[in-house]
Amino acid sequence: MVKWLKELDETLRGQKADPRMLAEGTAHIQIAPLVAASVVLGMIYGVCMGLYAVATRTPPCFAQLVTSAIKVPALFFLTLLVTFPSLYVFSALLGVRLGPKDTFRLILVPVTINLAVLASLGPITAFFTLSTTSYPFMKLLNVLFFAVAGLIGLKILLAMLSSLEAAQIPLAAMLREPEKIKGPVTDADKATPAKPTPQPVSRDRTAASKTFMVWVAIYALVGAQMGWILRPLVGSPDLPFQLFRNREANFFVDVFRTLSRLLGQ
Amino acid sequence: MMRTLLRAIDDFLRGRGVFAADAPLSGRLRWLLVLLVTCGLFYGAVMGTYSGLTPGRLHQLLYSGVKVPLLLLATFALCLPSFFVINTIAGLREDFGEVLRAIVATQSCITVVLAGLAPITGFWYLSCGNYRQAILFNALMFGIATVAAQIVVRRYYGPLVRRSSRHRQLLWAWFFLYAFVGIQMGWVLRPFIGDPHIPVTFFRSGAWGNAYVVVARLVAGSVRGTDALITLLWLIAAAGVAALAFALFRVLRPRRTRRD
């Protein structure tokens, strides 16, 4: 338990994305503690989300609370399960030198951060849940929070990729610009001796970052639709509790429908 | 006791002693919370006097008094976890002790300024006004206090922003989140002033509800039949979300290491 928290804390502090660490590979990212921490974080948010069915129904529907707590982590890991193979295949095809395990470790860090942000927004969701009866509002609030957390996770992924690319490039950079590496020693250099930190490269994106960019879009789309398939997560007050709802429409149609219901009433 | 409190308020307003921006942090947080609760209680009680000073209604003073610090502290507590996580992700965990005191100090400053404005509120109640005007006047006082508190924000956040410009963007994120939750918290904790014609209660019966839904319905109701305006509202909402996303992107942009 303490180990999970320590790993989680290191992840949040960005130590897993440290260019110097990434230069030596991805072995410092441990899969088991991060997965466990992600599941717990997802469950925390799931409970806050499922609280709506407890607060609005008489008698309170605790089954919704339990299923939401299971569904939120399931949402993230099922999405990963669906999209990971294509990521691996395409990245290998385009000549990215990451093995399947390395790729998974690399993806796990942003997913954990995503869930951590989501769980930290949990108290706000719970507060709005307890004081709101409007179902469309709660749905949109949850969509907004998922989107915010997802954007932060995306940002972290892009940052990690740029340091990873930098870690693979230093040799080439040294050959190209030797005078910059062995420049005159300044005070700042004395203050931070250590080994030269690889510079993040923003231009000439490599195959890795292109693949990941496309993959992120796929991940977001699949994730949104996965949330729709796994619904009900909040639980409409008019409908009885069900494990899964019938298949109809899709996520984006429903977001617009909800928006118009909230504004059109 | 009273004198110590007044001296602490003076030190706080001038940024001296334990409240100086560069003073050691130990002990500051406790004083900030003391100021927040006492000054908040005081203004709240004055705010509640509108409800009438007859023997049967005096507990409105207590209710209003408790609600002002409660509003600030509960909103603060709800927003703190996400602010902490976002600070950590942005790589600013080491500064969080200072950040925490800066945002608590902002809230303390709001209550201290409100306490200073309390006599004016009392005077307003005496000289005029129906219930609606009383509400508007109090909203104005809260607005003035929030603007005045920016001086304290600048005092404590200035050194942080000089250390890393990300602090500025995170401060904006904090204001946004705090306002979003605070508006709903204020709605839930109604009534703050207490309508003199209604019996005194801590919560208004049927007060639960959502401030944003109420506003959306009011706006939608006033423009019913004109779909163009609803579309416009959608666009505004979408633009707001996009702006928020853009701000987050900028905050979390990978830190550029120095090139020499």
Image: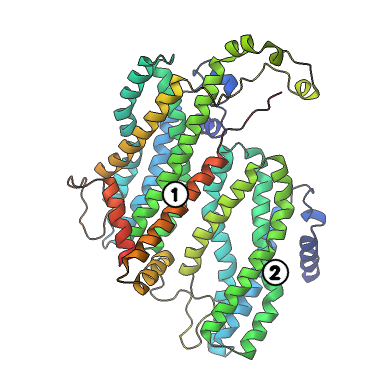
According to the picture, the residue beneath numbered tag 2 turns out to be: B113
Is A183 left or right of A47, judged from the image as shown? right
Q: Chain of mark 2?
A: B
- The chain letter under disc 1 is A
Residue A199 found in image quarter: top right
Look at label 2 and name its amino acid.
Val
SS under mark 2? helix
Query: Which quadrant of the figure has residue B39?
Result: bottom right
The residue labelled by disc 1 is: A122
Give me the C-alpha separation between circle 1 and circle 2: 32 Å
Q: Quadrant of the N terminus of chain B?
A: bottom right
Residue displayed at 45% across by 45% down: A148
Q: Nearer the viewer, residue A163 or B93?
A: A163
Q: Looking at the picture, which amino acid does disc 1 mark?
A: Gly
| Residue B38 at least partly seen | no
Q: Residue A5, percent across and down? A: 51, 34
